[in-house]
Image (cartoon, rainbow, N blue to C red):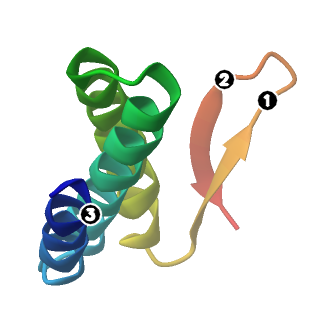
Amino acid sequence: MKKAIALVLVALAVASCTQTERGAGIGAASGAIIGGAITGDVRGAAVGAAIGGVSGAVIGHVTDQPGQCYYRDRYGRRYIDAC
């Protein structure tokens, strides 16, 4: 059953319209799988999905902006700037 749910989530992520939506969908699906596998419960899967979804949306949003790249400064903060 878990594999079927994971496959449906991945299929929905790929069918999304924009890169931001694809990134969020793929991030949420993979975060849920990883969180559930590590903790072994639903709470871990939910936290993993939330973290993965937000991270995927941020990364997907950057790919929607041509000529913009995603960087980290020396303090670990993320920012977007011209490539």
Distance between the alpha carbons at the discs numbered 3 and 2: 35 Å
Q: Secondary structure at mark 2?
A: loop
The quarter of the picture where the C terminus appears is: bottom right
Q: Is residue 55 above or below residue 67?
A: above
Q: Left of 39 or right of it: where is 32?
A: left
The type of residue carrying mark 3 is Lys
Point out the residue furthest to the right here.
74
Distance between the alpha carbons at the discs numbered 1 and 3: 38 Å
Identify the residue at image location x=26%, y=69%: 22
Q: Which residue is mark 1?
A: 73
Q: Which residue is mark 3?
A: 3
Q: Is residue 69 above or below residue 80?
A: below
Q: Is residue 47 above or below residue 20?
A: above
Q: Position of residue 6 (x, y in %)?
A: 24, 61
Q: Left of 56 or right of it: where is 10?
A: left
Marks 1 & 2, CB-CB < 8 Å contact: yes
Foreground label between 3 and 2:
3
> Does label 3 or label 2 sit earlier along the sequence?
3
The type of residue carrying mark 2 is Arg
Identify the residue at image location x=22%, y=23%: 42
Identify the residue at image location x=30%, y=72%: 19
Q: Which residue is mark 2?
A: 77
Viewer-proximal residue, 65 or 30?
A: 30
> Does label 1 or label 3 sit earlier along the sequence?
3
Q: Secondary structure at mark 3?
A: helix
Distance between the alpha carbons at the discs numbered 1 and 2: 6 Å
Q: Secondary structure at mark 1?
A: loop
Q: Position of residue 70 (x, y in %)?
A: 62, 53
Identify the residue at image location x=13%, y=71%: 8
The type of residue carrying mark 1 is Asp
Q: Position of residue 51 (x, y in %)?
A: 37, 30
How many numbered marks have been drawn onto this rendered protein structure?
Answer: 3
